[in-house]
């Protein structure tokens, strides 16, 4: 009898795992899920609106001539922006040659060789520098190089862009190095390697995907900057002549100049230049995502 009573009462003690849609907690979860989805949609609408609008406006001039010819003169209807593309590559290359070595070495010092008291204010200064408006970098390069050299140049523009690239490279490289487990460093030192050998042959290769990500993001930002170039270079519709020539064409500057023109043809080329810049940022973002997917830690 006792067993029968236990068996009869046992199902009554089982707790139901089914969700009750009318419970306040379930209602709150549904409301917050809907609000989160709405916020994502609101965030994506401006992004896709800009991309679609730039694509539609710039598609009419997207052809081979765009990448091989000079901008059209007054009265012409055909041409390209090849000079601005080459000028942008030259200025960004100068900025990268300056920012990448200094940024990576600074991050290595912060992560591997400095103590916390020294690293904390440097990291804080890096965060502050990353929030400085780009026009300040242009004024800095103008005062430091343009006034002292007595002329505008692509080198001055590269220095201004390097100032903007440095914080991104330092921060991402520092974070990538800190992600590498300490056990790897201890194991390397334990087999007789010096700190220099450990950093150069063990830590840096392990953190390389994260470092590449930071570099590509910094390059993408530098390629689209206009304000620093307003103070450091003079735009020209001719081919770039060298790093110290006073006239240097660039994509961002071309878009700025042509968009202000009353000529419909030049405005179309401004949209085409904007589309090329968007594609450049898209490619660098894809490369950074690919590099991130190769991370080991």
Image (cartoon, helix red, strand yellow):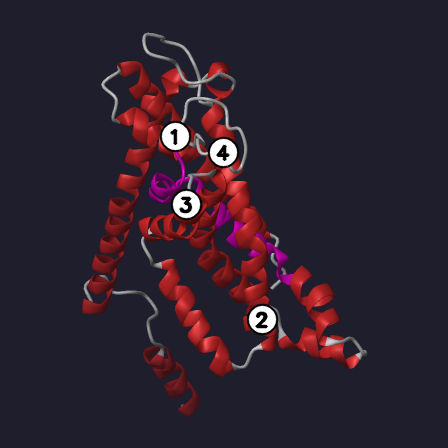
Query: Which residue is found at the position 59% from the left and 56% from the top?
Result: 101
Q: How much space separates mark 4 and mark 3, taking CA atoms?
A: 12 Å
Q: Residues within 10 Å of mark 3 (few under 14, many from 20)?
A: many
Mark 1 vs mark 4: in front: 4
292 vs 217, nearest the viewer: 217
Residue at which label 3 appears: 146
- Per the rendered image, the range of residues in magenta is 206-234
Q: How much space separates mark 2 and mark 1, taking CA atoms?
A: 39 Å
Q: How much space separates mark 3 and mark 2, taking CA atoms?
A: 31 Å
Mark 2 vs mark 4: in front: 4
Q: Label the magenta part by its dominant secondary structure.
A: helix
Q: How much space separates mark 2 and mark 4, taking CA atoms?
A: 35 Å
Q: Quadrant of the C terminus?
A: bottom right
Q: In the rendered structure, which disc, 2 or 4, sits on the residue that comes first in sequence?
A: 2
Q: Is residue 207 left or right of residue 171?
A: right
Q: Secondary structure at mark 3?
A: helix
Residue at which label 2 appears: 109
């Amino acid at each position: 009898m006792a067993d029968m009573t236990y068996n009869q009462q046992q199902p009554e003690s089982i707790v139901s795992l089914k969700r009750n849609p009318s419970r306040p907690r379930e209602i709150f979860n549904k409301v917050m899920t809907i609000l989160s989805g709405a916020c994502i949609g609101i965030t994506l609408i401006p992004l896709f609106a800009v991309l679609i609008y730039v694509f539609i406006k710039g598609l009419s001039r997207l052809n081979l001539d765009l990448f091989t010819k000079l901008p059209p003169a007054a009265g012409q209807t055909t041409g390209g922006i090849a000079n601005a593309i080459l000028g942008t590559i030259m200025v960004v290359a100068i900025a990268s040659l300056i920012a990448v070595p200094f940024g990576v070495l600074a991050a290595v010092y912060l992560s591997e060789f400095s103590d916390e008291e020294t690293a904390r204010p440097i990291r804080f200064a890096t965060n502050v520098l990353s929030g400085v408006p780009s026009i300040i970098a242009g004024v800095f390069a103008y005062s430091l190089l343009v006034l002292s050299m007595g002329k505008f140049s692509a080198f001055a523009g590269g220095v201004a862009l390097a100032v903007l690239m440095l914080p991104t490279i330092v921060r991402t490289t520092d974070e990538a190095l800190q992600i590498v487990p300490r056990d790897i460093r201890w194991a390397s030192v334990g087999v007789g390697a010096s700190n220099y050998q450990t950093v150069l042959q063990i830590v840096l290769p392990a953190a390389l995907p994260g470092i590449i990500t930071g570099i590509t993001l910094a390059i993408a930002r530098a390629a689209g900057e206009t304000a620093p170039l307003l103070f450091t270079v003079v735009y020209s519709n001719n081919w770039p002549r060298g790093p110290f020539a006073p006239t240097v064409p660039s994509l961002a500057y071309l878009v700025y100049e042509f968009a202000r023109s009353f000529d419909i043809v030049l405005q179309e080329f401004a949209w085409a230049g904007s589309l090329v810049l968007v594609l450049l940022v898209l490619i660098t973002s894809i490369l950074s995502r690919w590099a991130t997917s190769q991370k080991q830690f």
